[in-house]
Image (tube, rainbow, N blue to C red):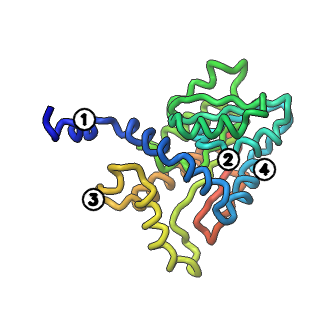
Amino acid sequence: MTAEQPNSRSRSRSPSSVAQSFYTRWATLYDALARRAPGVGSVRTEAADALALAPDETVVEMGCGTGANLPYLAERVGPEGTVVGVDFSPGVLDVARERTRDSPNVHLVRADATRPPVARGLAESPDAVLATFVSGMFDDPAAVVSSWADLVGSGGRLCLVDLAETTDPRWRPLNPVFRALVRATAPPGSRTMRASPTKMLNRRLVAAHRTLESRCRVTHETTHALGFARVRAGVVE
């Protein structure tokens, strides 16, 4: 075996496999950031409220990560409701399982959020879908968000929460710091590409949110964290 063979195998791994390994390795750190970053609790509260969940409804979180949102959702649908968390990384789901072990109405599924199998496991379509900080991970976010709108159907609710460069002139000087954080926290491969990871992120977020606006009657739009965090929700028409 030559010294080059392990590197060759590493290079041949799919982007999805690389990302899964990356988020599994850093699951504990991501969980700490997800729970303790300044203002993140108010963003999660607002996102859950924006879905206007009622007791006994079913809500699916796409890309649930370590489950930081799941208690907020479970509280709103109550013990008669159902919360489904979908994520492709086994490491972050392990953290989410520990977090929700005392919540029997929370169910976790290891799957790709672009092809969630949740409809097969539910008697009816879910009432709402939440996606927090994941829209920028998809090659075709417009198609993914549209598929979520199809999943919940007319009258269902969607909510996207994302981080992007701020447009608030008071805080634009902080955008270089944000770009550095995006590059530092991106999975291997995306950090070394010639195009800016932040520019790619911005393009994907614009596509995702425009699709939500085209498929939904927008009911909620706010920004947080100096304009870096955006919450947008709507009812599918």
| Dot label at residue 9 | 1
Q: Amino acid at mark 2?
A: Ala
Label 2, on which residue?
Answer: 68
Q: Earlier in the sequence, mark 4 or mark 2?
A: 4
- Image quadrant containing the N terminus: top left
Determine the CA span between mark 1 and mark 4: 45 Å
Q: Nearest to the eye among marks 1 and 4: give it.
A: 1
Q: Nearest to the eye among marks 4 and 2: give it.
A: 2
- Left or right of 227: which side holds 173? left
Q: Earlier in the sequence, mark 4 or mark 3?
A: 4
Q: Tell me residue 193's x, y (percent).
A: 29, 55
Q: Nearer the viewer, residue 130 or 217?
A: 130
Is label 2 in contact with label 1 (beta carbons under 8 Å)?
no
Q: Earlier in the sequence, mark 2 or mark 1?
A: 1
Q: Is residue 42 above or below residue 208?
A: below
Label 3, on which residue?
Answer: 194
Determine the CA span between mark 1 and mark 3: 23 Å
Determine the CA span between mark 4 and mark 2: 15 Å
Secondary structure beneath dot 3 equals loop
Secondary structure beneath dot 4 equals helix
Secondary structure beneath dot 2 equals loop
Mark 1, residues whose alpha carbon is within 10 Å: few (<14), some, or many (≥20)?
A: few
Whether residue 62 is visible, yes or no, is: yes
Determine the CA span between mark 3 and mark 2: 33 Å
Q: Nearer the viewer, residue 213 or 121?
A: 121
